[in-house]
Amino acid sequence: MQKTIKVDKQHVEKRIIDWKKRVSDLYSTIELWLTGSDYYIKRGSKLKMYEELMSEFNVRATNIETADIYKDNKIVLALKPKGLWMVGANGRIDLLSTKGNYMLVDFAEQFESPYWKLFNGDKKNGVEFTKRSFFQLLNK
């Protein structure tokens, strides 16, 4: 039986805090994966986050971190959080590169440990986001 969740200003604020933590934790995981490789990650500029529910419940706009993956001092992949409130998901991060664009989508329930899946442009055939799938993407 699905539990009903009361969506109010406090709930929206709590989800934003959780989203920022999940994104930051993901960047930390990637940083660990890249240790000892030819790649490195730098947390980049911040993006403004102001989504529909934030407006509806009068929650101020906030900033969320981006990150860039470098090889030979050149950006090879940019990670840009796209949005928290996505139909059927718990947030999305766009992965942008000269070789193509991809998406990371979190399929975990609210406030649960993230379950990231990696998608190419088709949104249908996602694979679990692991160190292996990440390096396959980087080495395309």
Image: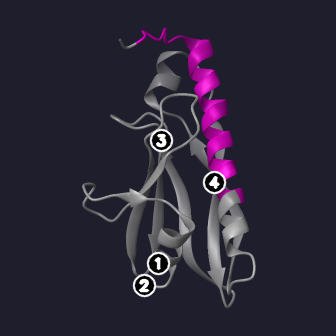
Tell me what residue is drawn at x 44 percent, y 28 percent.
Answer: 52
Please say if the residues under marks 1 and 2 sit with CB atoms less than 8 Å apart. yes
Q: Secondary structure at mark 3?
A: loop
Q: Nearer the viewer, residue 43 or 31?
A: 31
Q: Which residue is mark 3?
A: 91
Cα separation between marks 3 and 1: 23 Å
Up the image or down, 46 lies above or below 73; here it is above
Q: Which residue is mark 4?
A: 26
Residue at 68% of width from left, 74% of height from top? Answer: 34
Vertical order, 73 against 126 (above or below): below
Q: Residue furthest bottom?
A: 72
Image quadrant in which you'd find residue 123: bottom left
Position above or below: 13 against 117: above
Q: Is residue 139 left or right of residue 10?
A: left
Along the polypeptide, which appears first: circle 1 or circle 4? 4
Distance between the alpha carbons at the discs numbered 4 and 2: 21 Å
Badge 1 amino acid: Gln
Disc 2 marks a residue whose amino acid type is Lys
Mark 3 and mark 1 residues within 8 Å of each other at the beta carbon: no
Q: Secondary structure at mark 2?
A: loop
- Sequence-wise, the earlier of marks 3 and 2 is 3
Query: Which stretch is magenta?
Result: 3-28
Q: What is the CA distance from the residue labelled 1 to the residue labelled 4? A: 17 Å
Would you name the residue on which mark 1 appears?
A: 136
